[in-house]
Image: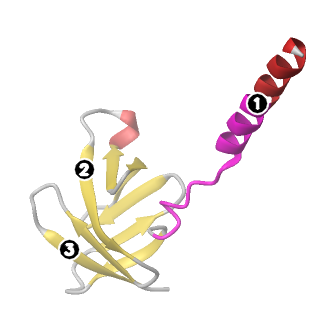
Amino acid sequence: MKTFALTFIHIACAIVLLMAACHKNDSTSKIKGDWKSKDGTTTLKITDKQFTLDNESPVPEDYFVKGDTIFTSFEGNQPYTRFVIEKADEKNLNLLFPDSVTVEFTRYQ
């Protein structure tokens, strides 16, 4: 009986860990794509691995999302630049830039 309980616990833990490892993170699926600010001055391109903000000179940066914040860095250098996601859906994206200015983006194809 003891070996059954220990075996069951180990198998249950392995299943939980496997499910957690295979779970797809959908927090970035809404923000991926090509975006243009509503005033037309800024374009934003978010792919699986890069965050490219084009004001005057586009510089692709690596990024990751934690909670409702996008952390970007150029070639892995720190400190990270933080962009807070205020609103994200299929057609609109509102980002709070590091200088506390909210920019509204719309998706374009």
Q: Secondary structure at mark 2?
A: strand
The answer for how far apart the CA atoms under marks 3 and 1 are is 44 Å
Which quadrant holds residue 36?
Answer: bottom left
Q: Identify residue type, mark 1.
A: Ala
Mark number, residue 32 = none
> Residue at label 1?
14
Residue lying at 21% horizontally and 79% vertically, measured from the top left: 41
| Residue type, mark 2 in image | Arg
Find the residue positioned furthest to the top.
2
- Residue 55 in view of the camera: no
The residue pinned by badge 3 equals 103
Which residue is identified by label 2?
A: 82
Q: Position of residue 62 (x, y in %)?
A: 42, 46
Image location of residue 37, percent across then percent down? 27, 80
Q: Residue furthest front?
A: 1
- Camera-nearest label, 3 or 1: 1
> Along the line of sight, which residue is nearer the eye, 74 or 18?
18
Placement of the N terminus among the 4 image quadrants: top right
Q: Viewed as shown, does residue 75 lie left or right of 14?
A: left
- Disc 3 from disc 2: Cα separation: 14 Å
Q: Residue at x 35, y 70 (%)?
A: 44
Q: Mark 1 or mark 3, which is nearer the start of the sequence?
A: 1
Per the image, is 97 magenta?
no
Mark 3 Cα within 10 Å, few/some/many (few <14, many 20+)? some
User: What segment is highlighted magenta in the picture?
Assistant: 12-30
Cα distance in 3D space between marks 2 and 1? 35 Å
Quarter holding residue 94: bottom left
Q: Earlier in the sequence, mark 2 or mark 1?
A: 1
Percent coordinates x, y for residue 61 in the rendering: 38, 49
Element at label 3: strand
Crowdedness near tag 2: few (<14), some (14–19) or many (≥20) residues, C-alpha within 10 Å = some
Name the amino acid type tagged 3: Val
